[in-house]
Amino acid sequence: MASARTATQGMSLDDVDLTDHARFADAVPHEMFRLLRDQDPVHWQDEREGRGFWAVTRHADITAVHKDWRTFSSERGGSSLQDLDPEAVVARKSMLDMDPPPHNKLRAIVNRDFTPRAVRVFEERIRSLIVTILERALAQGEVEFVREVSAELPMRVFAEMLGAPESDHRHLVELGDRMLGQDDPEYRLDPEVMRANSHLPFSNPAAADMFEYGRGLAAERRRCPREDIVTKLVEAEIDGCPLSEQEFDVYFLLLAVAGNETTRHSISHGLLALIDHPEQAERMRTDPDLSRSAADEILRWATPVHHFRRTATCDVELGGKQIREDDKIATWFISGNFDDREFSDPMRFDVGRDPNPQMTFGPGGPHFCTGAHLARLEIQVVFEELLKRVRSFELTGPVERLQSNAFNGIKRMPVRLEAA
Ligand code: HEM
């Protein structure tokens, strides 16, 4: 049985560099993370353009950090490793970059739209979107799977949840594409554009377009309320006050962006895992009841978000290391998901894995992914429908990975799909 693709073998702690995007170009550096978990699970990492950070790599330590939000804050310094200037942090602050109790009040606005029961309402619509997307791809036979399948679904589902008209779906998919992670040289914005937009809360011009789209929907829902997320946002009150325009913008943007790239990469990694492990695809075909555990295993295997950041609010000991107040901490889900202290034989892809305490949506705590049930459902249904319709699939060219230490992404993946 093939194991996970590993990038580095036989390395020492001196070779570790978690800031080097190129180390993530060919594959996830699983060997580097294994070394850290075994020998230095709370590891100090210097940065070229920053003050350095603690890298937390064991499942149990990552969980402890995320659950103790008083000691490990999302508000102080935000949730990304980049050190933004304080004004930018305030201007772009979403609930992701807040601590309770204000965080909980914002989160409560949409929380009930993402419960398992609420997202089940979308199941039939999601299924029919997927069938349309897959049948179009199957008719072509050879496709660039990311563009034709993985990238299409998440924004179309988001559009459905917004109640956006069908005619806007393509526009939303394109906007989502323009908001993709910027570590990879291919997606990096022109420095001129970044400079010209440096006075704005987000330097990517696609953010302004997304705000404009969201404001248009908000205006419509104010005139004519519906049972949807945008109506909830325009009618919401926090401590008796409606959301400001900026709060609405940032909320809308978070919802639009959070599930886009992440779900896309999960779908691509899922297909790649089944190509690499044909016996697991066969298991799923013969036992369709495995589709739910398979979705969780695909999510573990994919771990599209490598890490998040917290900042210490006081001096504290973690994994035997003395953390100082204001130190940055990166929690590496991509490492926790392959920790053999939690998972038996973690480098084995096993669609029936049980238990599977994957931390792809975070390990719990106040910021646990709002969209987890929705994303899991999308992945489950994609592979149910794909395995029903597609007899065989194979790569027809190289898989092009995103060069990023933040996202486990696939940019392009040419495949041949043969109908069942
Ligand atoms: C496979 C797909 C997805 C992955 C891997 C993913 C991953 C994550 C992670 C790691 C977090 C932070 C957890 C933490 O800090 O403890 C998060 C938060 C969040 N996610 Fe997702 N996500 C996915 C899909 C979605 C979808 C479909 C939506 C819905 C629109 C969504 C909305 C959010 C929001 C709003 C937050 C912020 C929650 C908060 O701060 O309280 N995500 N996600």
Image (cartoon, rainbow, N blue to C red):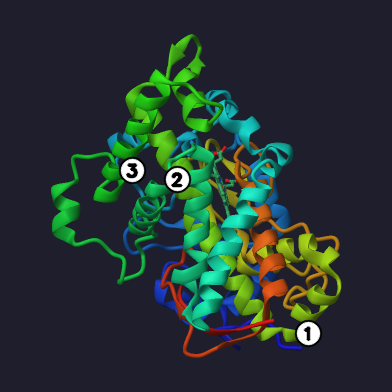
Q: How many residues crowd around disc 2 within 10 Å: few (fewer than 14), some, or many (20 or more)? A: many
Q: Position of residue 195 (x, y in %)?
A: 15, 51
Q: Position of residue 121 (x, y in %)?
A: 68, 40
- Kind of residue sitting beneath label 2: Ala
Using residue 374 as the reference point, say whether residue 402 is left or right of it.
left
At horizontal 31% and vertical 45% (from top left) the residue drawn is: 207
At horizontal 35% and vertical 25% (from top left) the residue drawn is: 219
Q: Quadrant of residue 244?
A: top left
**Contact (Cβ within 8 Å) of mark 1 with mark 3:** no
**Contact (Cβ within 8 Å) of mark 3 with mark 2:** yes
What secondary structure is found at the residue carrying circle 3?
Answer: helix
Give me the disc on residue 279.
Answer: 1
Q: Position of residue 343 (x, y in %)?
A: 79, 67
Confirm if mark 2 falls within 8 A of ligand 1: yes
Q: Quadrant of residue 269?
A: bottom right
At horizontal 13% and vertical 49% (from top left) the residue drawn is: 196
In the image, residue 170 sits, relative to residue 397, either above or below, namely above
Q: CA distance from mark 3 to mark 2?
A: 8 Å
What secondary structure is found at the residue carrying circle 2?
Answer: helix
For the question of whether residue 281 can be seen, the reply is: yes
Give me the disc on residue 239.
Answer: none
Give me the disc on residue 256.
Answer: 2
